[in-house]
Image (cartoon, rainbow, N blue to C red):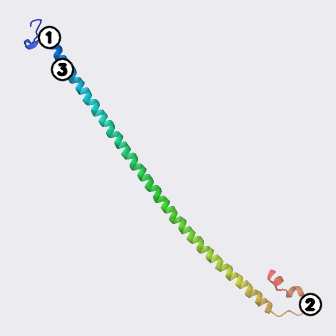
């Protein structure tokens, strides 16, 4: 092998050009890898944002469902309270009427013989 030539008989001056081509090619591969990595990062970021958005949406749906259910329960409790209030009002009316009827009945009871005025007072009789 001669000193000034490479395998195949090419002159030694050609070696730096080949090294430059290899360096250029390596630089191109590195740049392509960097672009691919940047694209992967961007896709991962977009997927993360999509998942966070979907999770937020689902959380809001759950909150809305719970609020709707709580509203239904509150409405039901209000209806029940109103029904109880109505029943208590009717019961109060019935008891008031019954007390008046009892008072009238006691007033009709003939007075017992004797001077016991206290026994003849309907309020005192009811109080016993």
| Quarter where residue 28 is shown | top left
Q: Which quarter of the image is occupied by the N terminus? A: top left
Alpha carbon separation for disc pair 2 and 1: 152 Å
Residue 114: x and y in percent read 91, 92
Residue 2: x and y in percent read 9, 6
* Residue 28 visible (yes or no): yes
* Residue 128 visible (yes or no): no
Q: Which mark is residue 21?
A: 3
Name the N-terminal-most of marks 2 and 3.
3
For the residue pair 101 and 126, the one nearer the viewer reads as 101
Q: Which quarter of the image is occupied by the C terminus? A: bottom right
Q: Residue at x 44, y 52 (%)?
A: 59
Name the N-terminal-most of marks 2 and 1.
1
Instruction: Kindly give the residue lying farthest to the left in the view shown.
Output: 9
Alpha carbon separation for disc pair 2 and 3: 139 Å
Q: Which mark is residue 115?
A: 2
Q: Residue at x 16, y 16 (%)?
A: 17
Q: Residue at x 34, y 42 (%)?
A: 46
User: Relative to residue 1, is residue 64 depicted above or below?
Assistant: below
SS at badge 1 = loop
Q: Which residue in the protein does label 1 denote?
A: 13
For the residue pair 63 and 91, the one nearer the viewer reads as 63
CA neighbours of label 3 inside 10 A, class few (<14), some (14 to 19), many (20+): few
- Lateral position of residue 35 relative to residue 22, left or right: right
SS at badge 2 = loop
Residue 23: x and y in percent read 22, 20
SS at badge 3 = helix
CA neighbours of label 1 inside 10 A, class few (<14), some (14 to 19), many (20+): few
């Amino acid at each position: 092998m001669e000193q000034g030539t490479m395998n195949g008989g090419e002159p030694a001056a050609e070696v730096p050009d080949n090294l430059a081509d290899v360096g250029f090619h390596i630089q191109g591969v590195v740049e392509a890898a960097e672009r691919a990595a940047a694209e992967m990062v961007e896709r991962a970021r977009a997927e993360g944002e999509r998942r966070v958005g979907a999770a937020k949406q689902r959380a809001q749906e759950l909150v809305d469902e719970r609020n709707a259910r709580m509203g239904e329960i509150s409405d039901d409790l209000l209806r029940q309270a109103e029904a109880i209030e109505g029943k208590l009002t009717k019961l109060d009316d019935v008891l008031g009427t019954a007390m008046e009827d009892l008072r009238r009945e006691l007033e009709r009871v003939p007075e017992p013989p004797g001077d016991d005025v206290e026994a003849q007072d309907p309020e005192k009789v009811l109080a016993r």
